[in-house]
Amino acid sequence: MSARRRPGFTLIELLVVIAIIAILIALLVPAVQKVRDAAARAQCQNNLKQIALGLHNYHDTYKYFPPGCITDAPPWGTGGGWGSSWKVFLLPYIEQANIYNKWLFNGSSGYTNGNNIPLINGITIPPYRCPSSSQPEMYTNMANGNGWNEMFTSYTGISGSVNTAIDVGQVNTGNGHGPNSGGGVLYANSKVKMTGITDGTSNTMLVGEQSDHLRDANNQIVPGSWGAITSQGPHGWAMGAGGAQVGNAYGDRTFNCTTIRYMINQNGMSNNSGNGTHDNTGNNIPLSSNHTGGCNIALGDGSVRFVSSSTPLQTLQLLACRLDGIPVPNY
């Protein structure tokens, strides 16, 4: 008795199966991408939550929020020069006391200080980095001529806004690097107390996301002479201020802080000092992210919110100012 032969797939049947598999894959890939995006957005929000709680713990200790950026002068240091940013002051409150305890706040502590450079060379601090950032994780900082690897961070302090009607005159417009404000919480040589946030902590931004590249009117990455254009500039996340003036009286670049002048993810920017979007560095580089439709911000009450790219500029400026007395619209 002969064995019965099993029929195989015809070519048409095989093609149908392949087509079905291709359709299923096409449906699955966007779903997987959405899950990844949601996870990255949640991790970014968790980072900002840690930062906000760290800022509050700093306030509990010193009775004021850390300065946005300083020169090395009392009460923080000595020797002058380009001092440190709020990201350095926050280190003990985000489980990085091992770096902070060795940090010297004298003689360009955030720039070329020979003691401090090795402390941050090649070091990644997870709460300072959004997982969906399009920027390289590290770059070579050549500030002292020798070069060391320094991480790109994803968050910037909020100094205030350029709208003088909202920021009640707290804006310096003549520094050549874009307007500087002292109407927010983290600005040059600031010592803002909780009681100084008269608009209410839930209506005032402390920190915003800046994890994507600056883009031009054609949605192309704006080229810089050294790389990504963010508020930390080419000199790094530790870089602060170069003079002792406070807030809007400060007339130079403010590293790791931004004065709100543009909408979130706004295109049409250029590598321009007058626009406040220069690579070294602008005081008005907009908030940005790779999250779909907006970016994350941390508020003065410690909460974190996702803010749409379509949020009106005036709403952002109201959130950036701590003492304008104007109600913030729903956003």
Image: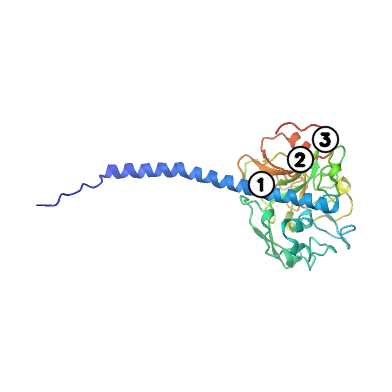
Left or right: where 244 falls relative to 269: right
Residue 291, how many percent across, how many down?
62, 44
Secondary structure under tag 2 reads loop
Left or right: where 2 falls relative to 186: left
Which colour style is shown? rainbow
- Amino acid type, callout 1: Gln
Q: Of tags 1 and 3, which is closer to the observer?
A: 1
Secondary structure under tag 3 reads loop
Q: CA–CA distance between discs 2 and 1?
A: 23 Å
Q: What label does residue 45 carry, if any?
A: 1
Residue 205, how many percent across, how many down?
76, 42
* Label 2 close to label 3 by CB (< 8 Å): no
Q: What label does residue 166 carry, if any?
A: 3
- Amino acid type, callout 3: Ile
Q: How crowded is mark 2: few (under 14 residues within 10 Å), some or many (20 or more)?
A: many
Q: Which of 144 and 20 is in front in this view?
A: 20
Q: What residue do we see at 76% from left, 39% from top?
A: 202
Task: Determine which residue is flagged by label 2.
Answer: 261
